[in-house]
């Protein structure tokens, strides 16, 4: 069965360190998204991609970057982790034109100390 | 004013009751309306979606959209403890647009 997996599921890091969260999907979807979910804010879009070599900034992109070198993967990098980036991060994917149906991973819980 | 407003709850109801979850929005350009369900420590999953105004029914779930009032609802009939989750409303302007999510309402169905 097709799926979308995130790794690691939990991560503890220190402020100032670079951190990369992995997202891998086997749906062969062109569209991929990264969200963060915080109490009181809901799901907020960080970055998204509509295909290989395409990346776009979302609502809360400062301090984050992504790159898309193949269809299956969209890693999220925190350039210099800050305590404000402590959150639960979700990756999602969808078909072109079928974006109402986004398939989400199980999430990565990141703590920046 | 936020584009999408949703009461975070928690909302606790007894098993078997009818549950009503709601969202309001400010952007009249929204045309696609979705409800996602999120169990604890899991990613959201799409429950159902509607295009423009009207009702859509799927088993025990009914989604309603009132574009004139900028108000959407999700009704759950014969609620079960397994319906306990966070329900996120979501919407977008067109098929190529980004999805805007509400903050989610936590629902507890009491056995």
Image: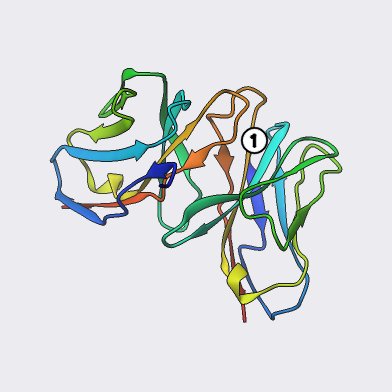
Q: Which of B110 and A66 lies nearest the eye of the viewer? A: A66
Residue at (76% x, 72% y) in the render:
A80
Identified at 34% across, 23% down, the residue is: B67
Position in image of residue A9 (x %, y %): 61, 63
> How many discs mark residues in the rendered view?
1
- Against B47, residue A89 (above or below) is below
In the rendered image, the quadrant that contains the N terminus of chain A is top right
Residue A17 at x, y = what percent? 76, 76
Classed neighbour count for the residue bearing mark 1: other residues with Cα under 10 Å, few (<14), some (14–19), many (≥20): few
Identify the element where label 1 is drawn: loop
Q: Chain of mark 1?
A: A
Task: Identify the image quadrant of residue A93.
Answer: top right
User: What residue lies at 44% left-to-right and 41% top-to-bottom?
Assistant: B3
Residue A113's x, y, as percent? 62, 82
- Answer with left or right where residue A85 lies relative to residue B60: right
In this orientation, which residue lies closer to the viewer: B19 or A44? A44
Residue B35 drawn at (x, y percent): 40, 35
- The relative height of residue A111 versus residue B106 in the rendered view (above or below) is below
Q: Which residue is mark 1?
A: A2
Q: Residue furthest front?
A: B1
Q: Is residue A112 above or below residue A47?
A: below
Colouring used for the render: rainbow
Image vertical order of residue A77 relative to residue B14, above or below: below
Residue A99 as seen in the image, left or right of residue B37: right
Q: Quadrant of residue A77?
A: bottom right
In the shown orientation, is residue B9 left or right of residue A61? Answer: left
């Amino acid at each position: 069965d097709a799926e979308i997996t995130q790794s690691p599921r939990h991560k503890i890091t220190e402020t100032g360190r670079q951190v990369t969260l992995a997202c891998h999907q086997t749906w062969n979807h062109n569209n991929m998204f990264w969200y963060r979910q915080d109490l009181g804010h809901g799901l907020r879009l960080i970055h998204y991609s509509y295909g290989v070599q395409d990346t776009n900034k979302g609502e809360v992109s400062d301090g984050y970057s992504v790159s898309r070198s193949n269809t299956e993967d969209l890693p999220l990098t925190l350039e210099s982790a800050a305590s404000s980036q402590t959150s639960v991060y979700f990756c999602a994917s969808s078909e072109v034109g079928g974006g109402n149906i986004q398939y989400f991973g199980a999430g990565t819980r990141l703590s920046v100390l | 004013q936020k584009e999408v407003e949703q009461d975070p709850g928690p909302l606790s109801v007894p098993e078997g009751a009818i549950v009503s979850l709601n969202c309001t929005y400010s952007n009249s350009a929204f045309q696609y309306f979705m409800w996602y369900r999120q169990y604890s420590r899991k990613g959201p999953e799409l429950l159902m979606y509607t295009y423009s105004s009207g009702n859509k029914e799927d088993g025990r779930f009914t989604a309603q959209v009132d574009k004139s009032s900028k108000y959407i609802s999700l009704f759950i009939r014969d609620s079960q403890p397994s319906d306990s989750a966070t329900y996120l409303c979501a919407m977008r302007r067109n098929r190529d647009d980004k999805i805007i999510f509400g903050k989610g309402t936590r629902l507890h169905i009491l056995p």
